[in-house]
Amino acid sequence: MSMGARFCPDKTFNPRKLLICIKSKATMKITKLVCTPLLVPNKVPYHWAHGVIMGATVILVEVQTDEGISGYGECIGTPSAEAICCYLKLAEKMIVGHDPFENARLLREIYHRFFQAHGNCSAPRYAGMLLAGLEMALWDVMGKSTDKAVHELLGGALHDKISYFGFVQGETPDELAAHARILCDEGCEVIYAKVGRGDKLDYEIVKSIRDAIGNEKRLRIDPNEHWDPQTAVRMIAKLSQFDIDFVEQPSHCESISALAQIHAGSPVSISADQAVFTPFDTYDVCREKAADIIVLGLHETGGISRFRQCAGIAEAAGLNICIHGLHETGITTCAMIQAASTIPNIDDGNQYMNHLLAWDIIDSPNLELQKGKLPIVSGPGLGFSLNVDAVEAAKQAFLESDQS
Ligand SMILES: [Mg+2]
């Protein structure tokens, strides 16, 4: 299929040409969905409130078409890559034979069949994690088939660059503080650190980092739901002396009321992270004034379209969206940039995680921060090229792990 056939650029009306155009538009079909579990190790162990993580388990999702165009996305492989692959293989039966440009309808039907189960159950958050990779891959196909970057298909980019925070890594307060200083020297204006590891250690972490980075840089902390409201009130009051930019998701993800309770009395801004997956969550956080900003990524929303829906709801409430990172590869980073570049209310200290990996499964683009920023990604599609040797190595690493 050529671009001309799909979009009929010849404005002269000709019924025969129109017929060819309509026939041609219906020609591209999805032929296969391939799911490959991968494991990519981290550079250093990742310490946070839920323990230590040694690498990223993801599922490479490939949508193949009868025109030889393949699109790629990825799903987060937790809690079970095998279980997610089973669902994706069921989804394959619902998309084979359809045009990738039916993306929105296909995803809606899959969601309804598997996660609303025709009214018998509801698992919207799991659905978002599971469908994200498929949705990304369909966008990649659509972009490649039209020779356009995905952000162009979404109306065009509003930003030239996306700004990221410096994500400190290490175990001890001294290690974290030393890394924070390096990130500041590299040009990051916002520093972000994990806490929720115990009151005394949290205090030492925040104090050490603030001492290391000085008073000019902004400092965010994330207890990852580990504080109940009482602990949150106590710790936020204690840590506020270190000029905290915001505290991210201090309390349990399932209680927007608890988040609102903490937010109402907090001297520090509060962000909602794990409390928000869907447009409905976004609306509830805004309505209940539970946070000052929403942290959100494609693996929560189920892909690019619903991410943009959530961003629109937040915009109407006056809130920005801060990109959320998970244990993911450059595929997600590129897809996230495509989406984030099209929303007006993107934050200036976003998160990405593929730079924590020892190596990535993409060859290009270069995703090394330049003074805390990444340029938007050009196309076609999501704009990355896979490193097939790295994919194979990650495939073997998964097979040799205790997760397979
Ligand atoms: Mg978080």
Image (cartoon, rainbow, N blue to C red):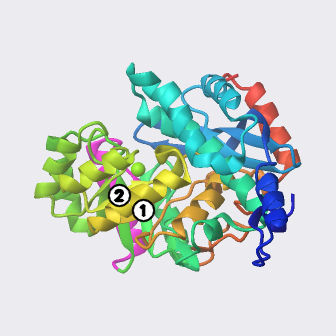
Disc 1: residue Cβ within 8 A of ligand 1's nearest atom: no
Rendered view: 216 above or below 266: below
What's drawn in magenta, residue-wise?
Answer: 192-215
Question: Is the Cβ of the residue at disc 1 closer than 8 Å to that at disc 2?
Answer: yes
Q: How many marks?
A: 2
- Main SS of the magenta part reads helix
Instruction: Name the residue carrying label 1.
Output: 322
Q: Residue 292's image quarter?
A: bottom left
x, y percent for residue 370: 63, 76
Say which quadrant the C terminus sits in: top right
For this orientation, the residue located farthest to the left is 265
Q: Residue at 35% across / 57% down in the picture?
A: 294
Rendered view: 12 above or below 385: below
Q: Residue at 13% across / 48% down in the picture?
A: 261
Say whether residue 286 is left or right of residue 167.
Answer: left
x, y percent for residue 128: 49, 40
Given the image, on which type of amino acid does mark 2 rest? Ile
- Can you tell which mark lies on residue 341? none
Instruction: Name the residue carrying label 2.
Output: 294
The tag earlier along the polypeptide, 1 or 2, is: 2
In front here: 358 or 147? 147
Given the image, on which type of amino acid does mark 1 rest? Cys
